[in-house]
């Protein structure tokens, strides 16, 4: 037997249908109605009983096989092989750092997965050696591995980050936030295209930018920001004939009327706001300011700071939905936009 036929697969549930089948079988095992060695209905039988496609049921059975709960015997069917069930997917997040933006992604993933998964998180700090250790310790313990591959431009490790990721089973691997350089279409997941994103977003606000004489990108050294941001900024300034400058910080330099600043670090954002007040310059009139990456605070800070940002909530939801199978597991470019506020 599988379940009481009074049980139903809910069409309006946030839980994918294949996971509902998984959960029904696990529930029967937990209740003692299915034991080790018991046969469960065939894919065709379950498809007929619950009015589901064969592909949906096959996906559910493959998930149970991956968890070691059932096994298939050729020519005979599917049998319960373990009653040690945990009614949830296991997901490992491997972030490059823990920032306010990563927290937004993390909570979006947690909220979207709901009760369908347990999530562990580790930080690799841009370090391929640490990533290798984390993968060695966790391999085979999780259903899905989500990696933010922010380290591929500065590797000295004999094994590249790409080679490490290739060690993860293909059907369990998702990348997040950044594509693997040179292998952009190889790994499923969701990523930013930093150079094209900044170019397109700045171009969308061209009418606001034209009132400034010079654009200044404040790009800190040694903080592991993607260098593609610089490439996209330079390309935009070239195509639209903007005088431009790239600095690695705002310290003792005064602000000049007619300058528009694009800042990545929060410390530089604060410094420019403080300097504009000290020099009696009005943000959005005398001096322009755009901050990289949207946060709720920037919406209200100094009557509104313009931002250029990917959609972190969408990124988290997309990763979670790819884990749940409600979105295709393919490489997806995350939305990116300019949000115009008073500082511009």
Image: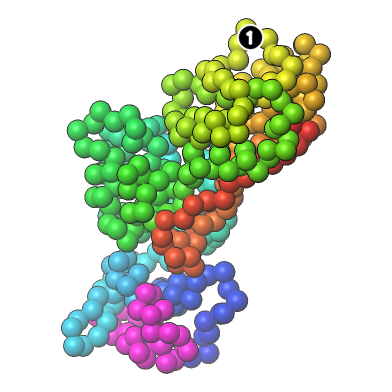
Q: Which residues are magenta?
A: 31-60
Crowding near the residue tagged with mark 1, few <14, some 14–19, many ≥20 C-alpha atoms within 10 Å:
few
Q: Position of residue 73 (x, y in %)?
A: 19, 81
Residue 147, can we see it? no
Left or right? Give the position of 54 relative to 297: left
Identify the residue at image location x=49%, y=45%. Answer: 192
Task: Name the quadrant of the C terminus.
Answer: top right
Q: Secondary structure at mark 1?
A: loop
Identify the residue at image location x=56%, y=20%. Answer: 245
Identify the residue at image location x=40%, y=37%. Answer: 150
Task: Name the quadrant of the N terminus.
Answer: bottom left
Residue 161, can we see it? yes
Quarter of the image where one finds residue 80: bottom left
Q: Position of residue 237 (x, y in %)?
A: 57, 30
Q: Nearer the viewer, residue 78 or 130?
A: 130
Q: Which residue is mark 1?
A: 253
């Amino acid at each position: 037997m599988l379940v009481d036929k009074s049980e139903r697969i809910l069409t309006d549930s946030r839980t994918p249908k294949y996971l509902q089948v998984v959960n029904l079988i696990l529930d029967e095992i937990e209740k003692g109605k299915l034991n080790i060695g018991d046969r469960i209905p065939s894919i065709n039988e379950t498809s007929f009983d619950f009015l589901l496609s064969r592909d949906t049921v096959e996906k559910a059975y493959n998930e149970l096989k991956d968890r070691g709960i059932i096994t298939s015997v050729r020519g005979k069917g599917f049998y319960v092989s373990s009653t040690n069930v945990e009614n949830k997917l296991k997901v490992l997040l491997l972030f490059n750092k823990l920032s306010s933006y990563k927290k937004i992604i993390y909570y979006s993933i947690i909220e979207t997965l709901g009760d369908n998964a347990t999530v562990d998180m580790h930080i690799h700090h841009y370090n391929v050696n640490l990533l290798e250790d984390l993968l060695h310790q966790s391999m085979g313990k999780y259903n899905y591995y989500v990696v933010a591959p922010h380290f591929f431009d500065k590797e000295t490790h004999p094994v590249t980050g790409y080679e490490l990721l290739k060690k993860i089973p293909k059907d369990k691997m998702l990348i997040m936030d950044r594509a693997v350089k040179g292998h952009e279409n190889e790994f499923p997941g969701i990523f930013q295209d930093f150079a094209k994103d900044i170019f397109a977003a700045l171009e969308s606000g061209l009418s606001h930018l034209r009132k400034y004489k010079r654009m200044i990108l404040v790009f800190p050294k040694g903080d592991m920001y993607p260098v593609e941001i610089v490439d996209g900024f330079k390309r935009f300034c070239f195509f639209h004939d903007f005088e431009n400058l790239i600095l690695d910080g705002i310290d003792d330099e005064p602000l000049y009327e007619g300058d528009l600043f694009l800042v990545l670090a929060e410390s530089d954002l604060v410094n420019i706001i403080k300097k504009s007040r000290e020099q009696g310059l009005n943000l959005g009139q005398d001096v322009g300011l755009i901050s990289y990456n949207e946060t709720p605070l920037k919406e209200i800070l100094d009557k509104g700071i313009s931002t250029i940002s990917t959609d972190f909530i969408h990124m988290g939801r997309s990763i979670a939905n790819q884990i749940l199978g409600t979105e295709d597991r393919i490489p997806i470019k995350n939305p990116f936009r300019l949000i115009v506020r008073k500082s511009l």
